[in-house]
Amino acid sequence: MVTASAAGKAILFGEHAVVYGEPALAIAIDARVSVSLEPCKGDWKIDGYPLDTSRHPHIAYLKNAILGDDSQNYSIQINSELFPAAGLGSSAALSSACSAAMLSTIGQPLDPEKISALSHLAEAAAQAGRASPTDTSTATLGGCVFVSDKKEQSSEWRYTRSLETPEGERNWEVHSVTLPPSVNDLWLVVGYTGIHSPTGDMVAGLAELLAKHPEKMTDISRMGELARNGVDALSNGDFTMVGQLMDEAHQLLAGVGVSCKELDDMVEVARRSSLGAKMTGAGGGGCMLALTTNPEETSAALEMRGGRVLVTPFGAPSVRIENS
């Protein structure tokens, strides 16, 4: 049996704006998805049930891309520490861990760039040919990941990702952000509203708003500026500035209609004991994120508001083989 795991993610800056060509900054969180592969008789199975390609198109893609049609059949066991359908990159972490496990079964070494490429294509296969590499790169590389439409001087360039989408070819430049040692004094507190809001609906709603109010594109551009400023502040260890940028990012996201009362309330409560707080992900529910040196107080305040809480250091490890 081979077991691999990959990290979930939270978007620090750039959610929604990345759809319009702006950069995004994401952080790997210390809650993981693990995948175990074990040879089995009969058909492929997931958690004891036959593999249904309509329910797990990303796994079906990886099975064919890595192992081929005439491979040994396997039983797959999945374990997730992430809140489900909460914008924390659970699907991308699953694809990354599954890629690593399948490659390991055929004796290939852990190659983050290859795993990232495969998992990105798997996510595109599951999303009608559209997928940003942000989630899969963060799940695979770990740490802090900056995705842009150009090579950025502020961070370490890792690779280019290209994808032929229904709207034409798209290209992204993926970077790793080097964090100072002082980041070890920081914590991220993720608060989950318990509300599921489909990403596609939120993206479509924002597109409709921008079509009616094109002047709102200045807010989208500002979100991209915040992402670049956030990289600089993080690299320089200016965490007070990072918190202030998070506060502004939430204000902008709320202003274009992708937040909700529950997220706004949790963000307001968290700010009393943190450097900054904002929604993270598609919005309309899902999760918020607080940057704090006092995770116990921030967590307690969010739990008092009825939120479920996950506390994570700033930047989790990359994809890894747990055993083989």
Image (cartoon, grey):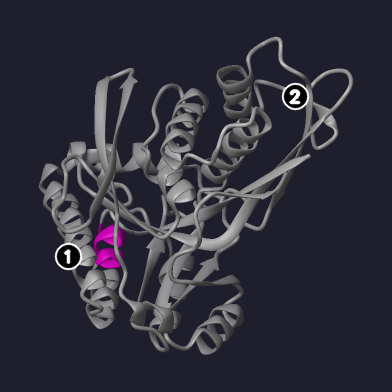
| Magenta range | 249-255
**What is the C-alpha distance between the residues marked 2 and 1?**
44 Å
Q: Residue 120: percent from the left, percent from the top?
A: 44, 33
Q: Is residue 254 magenta?
A: yes
Toward the viewer: 236 or 274? 236
> In the displayed structure, would residue 291 be above or below residue 115?
below
> In the displayed structure, would residue 53 be above or below residue 223?
above
Q: Is residue 99 magenta?
A: no
Q: Amino acid at mark 2?
A: Leu
Left or right, residue 267 beside residue 52: left
Residue holding disc 1: 229
- The residue most toward the top is 70
Q: Secondary structure at mark 1?
A: helix
Left or right, residue 82 beside residue 168: right
Q: Which residue is at 26% across, 53% downward?
A: 256
- Magenta stretch, main secondary structure class: helix
Which numbered tag is attached to residue 51?
2
Q: Quadrant of residue 259?
A: bottom left
Q: Amino acid at mark 1?
A: Asn
Q: Residue 293: percent from the left, percent from the top?
A: 43, 86
Q: Quadrant of the N terminus?
A: top right
Pointer 1 local density, CA inside 10 Å: few below 14, some 14–19, many at least 20: some
Q: Residue 133: percent from the left, percent from the top?
A: 37, 39
